[in-house]
């Protein structure tokens, strides 16, 4: 039921302390947290996430999951939107602060191989695991990356496009028209799907955007992979905080059966 091609066990996950190298503020509610101090052999694949205990205090008690946008020269870059207490604490961390870290966790996107032609649909911080896929892609693959933001300021600092040697075409869209096409990135994806042939579609971002991408991929019958950023508890398959329903009525744990899943096996319509 869930695509096995990208399945991953949590067997390499460990708990360890990382250190903040820097915090780069992009907009008033968006920033990049750069972490260092990973154990030897730490080798996250695109789509995997870190489960961070944002504070040594009791509150917030639960860890918070964040995708790894890049892991290079021992530095993990994490793109974070401030939405509540946990992400706000992370935004105020200082260089040298320690972060209790669990990872790497979760399933991965399939590698983009030679001859692949991949359509990516990413919105907001959902761009992070897709950027990781671009870093990892074969240079003999082709990628159209439809990336939706609220405004131009959110594009700045999102690394991974300009320094990538792979033939990656970025198609920007924004809510306010300050950069790229004014409208939804799914509008661009829809047009591209009429013009070109793709071997896979990848998505990550707001649920409504992923649901639209799902309908597009289904119409063309293209393999479709989605990273589900649902709320999590333990991150290890024990608490059932992260379940979602498959079309067969089964319940799947997003933390260990995902976050990257076969997007054709998700009930996208929410009541
Ligand atoms: C696998 C995975 C990868 C993720 N990667 C990133 C990332 O790269 N960057 C990033 O900014 N965020 C990412 N998230 C979402 C991130 O984990 C949450 O935004 C974060 O936990 C919020 O913590 P908080 O304490 O700031 O907010 P809380 O106080 O916990 O919540 C604030 C509000 O946001 C809502 N909320 C919290 N989490 C989610 C969620 N996952 N989906 C929808 N609504 C939510 C709550 O219901 C509440 O209304 C990811 C989530 C998952 C599961
Ligand atoms: S977060 Fe606990 S089972 Fe998935």
Image (spheres, rainbow, N blue to C red):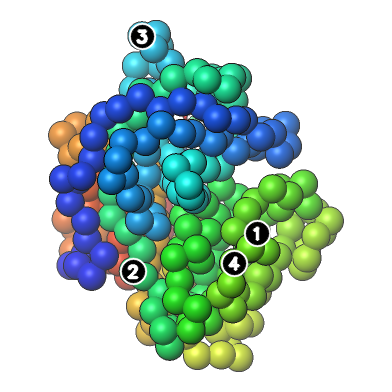
Q: Residue at x 39, y 79 (%)?
A: 113
Q: Which residue in the protein does label 3 denote? A: 58
Labelled disc at residue 110: 2
Q: Identify the image quadrant of residue 98.
A: top left
Q: CA distance from mark 1 to mark 4?
A: 19 Å
Quarter of the figure with the N terminus: bottom left
Q: Nearer the viewer, residue 191 or 75?
A: 75
Nearer to us of marks 2 and 4 is 4
Labelled disc at residue 148: 1
Query: Would you say residue 116 is visible in this rendering?
Result: yes
Nearer to us of marks 4 and 3 is 4
Residue farthest along the top direction in this orientation: 57
Q: CA distance from mark 4 to mark 3?
A: 41 Å
Residue 17 position in % (x across, y down): 35, 24
Q: CA distance from mark 1 to mark 3?
A: 36 Å
Nearer to us of marks 1 and 4 is 4
């Amino acid at each position: 039921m869930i695509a096995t091609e990208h399945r991953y066990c949590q067997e390499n996950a460990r708990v360890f302390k990382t250190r903040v190298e820097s915090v780069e503020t992009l907009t008033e509610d968006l920033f990049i947290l750069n972490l260092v101090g990973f154990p030897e052999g730490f080798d996250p694949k695109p789509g995997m996430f870190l489960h961070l205990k944002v504070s040594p205090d009791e509150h917030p008690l639960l860890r918070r999951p964040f995708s790894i946008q890049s892991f290079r020269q021992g530095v993990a870059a994490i793109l974070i939107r401030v939405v509540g207490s946990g992400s706000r604490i992370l935004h105020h961390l200082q260089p040298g602060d320690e972060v209790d870290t669990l990872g790497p966790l979760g399933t991965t996107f399939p590698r983009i191989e030679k001859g692949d032609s991949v359509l990516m649909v990413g919105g907001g911080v959902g761009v992070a695991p897709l950027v990781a896929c671009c870093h990892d892609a074969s240079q003999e693959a082709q990628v159209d990356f439809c990336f939706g933001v609220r405004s131009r300021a959110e594009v700045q600092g999102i690394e991974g496009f300009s320094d990538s040697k792979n033939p990656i075409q970025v198609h920007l869209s924004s809510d306010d028209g300050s950069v790229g096409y004014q409208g939804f990135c799914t509008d661009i994806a829809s047009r591209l799907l009429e013009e070109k042939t793709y071997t896979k579609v990848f998505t990550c971002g707001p649920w409504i955007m992923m649901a639209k991408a799902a309908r597009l991929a289904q119409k063309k019958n293209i393999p479709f992979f989605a990273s589900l950023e649902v709320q999590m508890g333990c991150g290890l398959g024990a608490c059932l905080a992260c379940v979602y329903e498959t079309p067969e009525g089964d319940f799947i744990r997003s933390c260990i059966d995902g976050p990257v899943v076969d997007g054709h096996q998700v009930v996208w319509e929410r009541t």
